[in-house]
Image (cartoon, grey):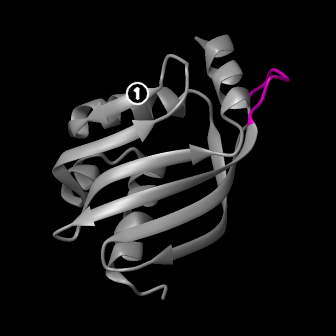
Amino acid sequence: MNNHPNLIVVNRFFEAYATNSIHELKDIFHEDIKWHIPGNHPLSGIKNGISEIVEYLNKLNRFNFKAEGVVIGANDDYVIDCHRNWTELEDADNLNNMSCLLWKFENGKIKEVFNFPQDQHIVDIFFNNKF
């Protein structure tokens, strides 16, 4: 299962995100990619295209997010990735939440991502307090 082509692409995403390798993202994202961020906060909404997603990811980088995988699965069209994510900010106001991402693929590239946080209310409070 770890060798499934879609898992390899998702792992490439996380490596590119960790190193801020924009050129790598352009290689793994479909040109019409959409990323769905639920909630009622300044970062929520649908991000359309690579440039909007890069802008979103750059904003996330300000919060020093960390992630620890819990479970991941794949088929030819989707990857589901569940993980614990948290921030390590100097103030005591950190986020610690479970989250699942559903990655949709088309022609070997990430076409759409859906974000499902464990507790949307906590996520909304965190980002509303930070912006």
The reply, left or right, for residue 49 in relation to residue 16 is left
Q: Main secondary structure of the magenta part?
A: loop
Which residue type does callout 1 highlight? Gly
The reply, left or right, for residue 44 in relation to residue 55 is right
Residue 5 horizontal/vertical position (percent): 32, 80
Residue at (35, 32) in percent of width and height = 46
Q: In the displayed structure, would residue 77 be above or below residue 62?
A: below
Q: In the displayed structure, would residue 79 be above or below residue 76?
A: above
Q: Quadrant of the C terminus?
A: top right
Question: Residue under circle 1?
Answer: 45
Residue 97 horizontal/vertical position (percent): 73, 43
Where are the magenta residues, as a range? 89-95
Q: How many numbered dots are placed on residues in this image?
A: 1
Q: In the displayed structure, would residue 29 be above or below residue 74?
A: above
Give yes or no for residue 92 being in the magenta stretch.
yes
Residue at (69, 22) in percent of width and height = 126
